[in-house]
Amino acid sequence: MSDNNNTSTLNSYITSAAGAVQSGIASITGNTGDKANAEHTKSEAEAQKAASQSAAKLGPFSIGSEGGVAKDSSDRTQGQYDQTMGSLKEATGNLLGNDGLVRSGREQNASGQGQEAKGQLSDLGQGISDRVGGAVGGALDTLTGDREGQQKNMERHDEGKARQRGVELELNKDNKN
């Protein structure tokens, strides 16, 4: 999982700092090879950061860059369903000229939006909590030499990151629409 790849945001910052140092050395020495290395390191840092921020959605599941998988809260799933059904009712009501059905659809859609937002907030908070708890717990387990605890906390961190990134992915998609 996380220790098998370099997708963490922290690693991207460390690589970026190394690129800045290389760039400083290159500007002092004027060496074109050093400049090329610095640019390569900076590009690598950007790629690491982009990878650490990525997630994928597959139905009600979020899959993070480090392999964590998190299931969306039931509020998110039900809210999305209510929005879809509300839109369908509204469209059908418009087609049939039924104002009551249009109104009912709009109300269900609005209710679904609120319920989805509530679920997103819940998942975002839970994701952040799991990431922090997993990172802190993993650090403590490292100090005590508890390998099993480290693995469990790494999984907790990765699931939290997937949950958080899944919400961010949806919010970014909604902002683009």
Image (cartoon, helix red, strand yellow):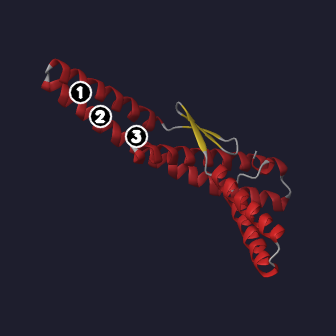
Quarter holding the N terminus is top right
Mark 2 or 1: in front is: 1
Cα separation between marks 2 and 1: 9 Å
**Distance of label 3 from label 2 (alpha carbons):** 10 Å
Q: Which residue is at a point 72% across and 50% down the rendered structure image?
A: 153
Q: In which quarter of the image is residue 115?
A: top left
Q: Which residue is at 34% across, 36% downward?
A: 112
Q: In which quarter of the image is residue 104?
A: top left
Q: Where is residue 8 in the image (x, y as percent from the top left)?
A: 70, 55
Which amino acid lies under the numbered mark 1 shown in the image of this protein?
Glu
Quadrant position of the C terminus in the picture: top left
Spot occupied by residue 155 in the image (x, y as percentages of width and height) = 71, 45
Q: Is residue 105 above or below residue 76?
A: above
Mark 3 neighbour class, 10 Å CA radius: few under 14, some 14 to 19, many 20 or more: many
Q: Nearer the viewer, residue 168 or 24?
A: 24
Q: Residue 90 carries which label?
A: 1
Q: Name which of mark 3 and mark 1 comes first in the sequence.
A: 1
Kindly check if marks 2 and 1 are in contact, taking CB atoms under 8 A apart as contact: yes
Q: Along the line of sight, which residue is nearer the eye, 87 or 70?
A: 87
| Figure quadrant of residue 132 | bottom right
Residue for badge 3: 116
Q: Can residue 84 be seen in this view?
A: yes
Disc 1, SS: helix
Disc 2: which residue: 109
Furthest residue to the bottom?
A: 28
